[in-house]
Image (cartoon, rainbow, N blue to C red):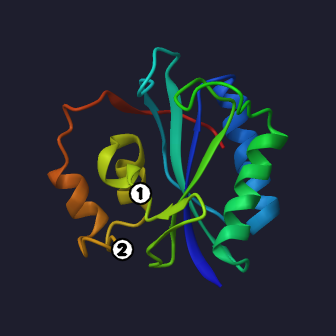
């Protein structure tokens, strides 16, 4: 079994789609560890604000199959892949970490670069895995969050009933 971390985001019917994403991940992977939900501005395009969170769970599938499960969940929840890369979405599920695997192949790069670039990924990851170390930098996520430039993007926790 691998411990995986998934970034979940939505800016279309975001409460409904966040809940649907969580439920689908429970069905696919079982018990989940959920971060708080955060609201962030759209990054890379003009659009409605996103709800974002990070989810940890165990996966018994190989890494590429695990990533395909996430794509299938997105598709089942109305993800439209016909638009530009940076656009509004019903559900965005990104595999951030698969144990401490470091790969860049077949359209999958781990650890995801967004971990070190975006507050909406790093803050919730630091919340649920503060002592876990980034596989490439060797630095813990709480330490990375502490050093992160928090003026770079707008991010705030939101009250969300699971």
Q: Residue at x 76, y 59 (%)?
A: 69
Q: Is residue 43 above or below residue 20?
A: above
Screen quadrant of the N terminus: bottom right
Apparent side of residue 123 relative to residue 60 in the rendered image (left or right): left
**Viewer-side residue, 101 vs 123:** 101
Q: Is residue 26 above or below residue 81?
A: below
Q: Residue at x 51, y 46 (%)?
A: 53
Q: Position of residue 158 (x, y in %)?
A: 47, 32
Q: Position of residue 78 (x, y in %)?
A: 80, 32
Q: Residue at x 65, y 24 (%)?
A: 83
**Viewer-side residue, 119 vs 117:** 117
Q: Position of residue 24 (x, y in %)?
A: 79, 52
Q: Quadrant of residue 3?
A: bottom right
Report the Cα–Cα distance between label 1 and label 2.
9 Å
Query: Circle 2 sits in a helix, a strand or a loop, which is it?
Result: loop
Apparent side of residue 119 relative to residue 94 in the rendered image (left or right): left
Which residue lies most toward the front here? 106
Per the image, the residue denoted by label 1 is 125
**Viewer-side residue, 26 vs 103:** 103
Q: Residue at x 44, y 79 (%)?
A: 100
Q: Position of residue 88 (x, y in %)?
A: 60, 23
Per the image, the residue denoted by label 2 is 132
Which residue lies most toward the bottom here? 1
Disc 1 packing (10 Å; few <14; some 14–19; many ≥20): many
Query: Circle 1 sits in a helix, a strand or a loop, which is it?
Result: helix
The first of marks 1 and 2 along the sequence is 1
| Numbered tag placed on residue 97 in the rendering | none
Disc 2 packing (10 Å; few <14; some 14–19; many ≥20): some
Q: Quadrant of residue 65?
A: bottom right
Q: Is residue 31 visible?
A: no
Determine contact: label 1, label 2, CB under 8 Å: no
Q: Is residue 99 visible?
A: yes
């Amino acid at each position: 079994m691998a411990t995986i971390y998934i970034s979940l985001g939505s800016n279309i019917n975001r409460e409904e789609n966040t809940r649907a994403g969580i439920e689908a991940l429970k069905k696919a992977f079982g018990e989940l560890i959920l971060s708080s939900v955060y609201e962030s501005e759209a990054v890379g395009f003009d659009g409605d604000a996103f709800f974002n969170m990070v989810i940890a769970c165990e996966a018994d599938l190989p890494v590429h199959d695990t990533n395909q499960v996430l794509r299938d969940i997105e598709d089942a929840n109305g993800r439209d892949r016909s638009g530009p890369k940076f656009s509004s979405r019903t559900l965005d599920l990104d595999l951030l970490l698969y144990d401490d695997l470091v790969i860049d192949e077949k359209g999958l790069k781990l650890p995801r670069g967004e971990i070190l670039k975006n507050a909406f990924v790093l803050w919730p990851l630091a919340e649920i895995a503060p002592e876990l170390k980034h596989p490439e930098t060797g630095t813990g996520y709480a330490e990375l969050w502490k050093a992160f430039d928090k003026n770079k993007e707008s991010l705030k926790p939101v009250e969300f009933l699971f």
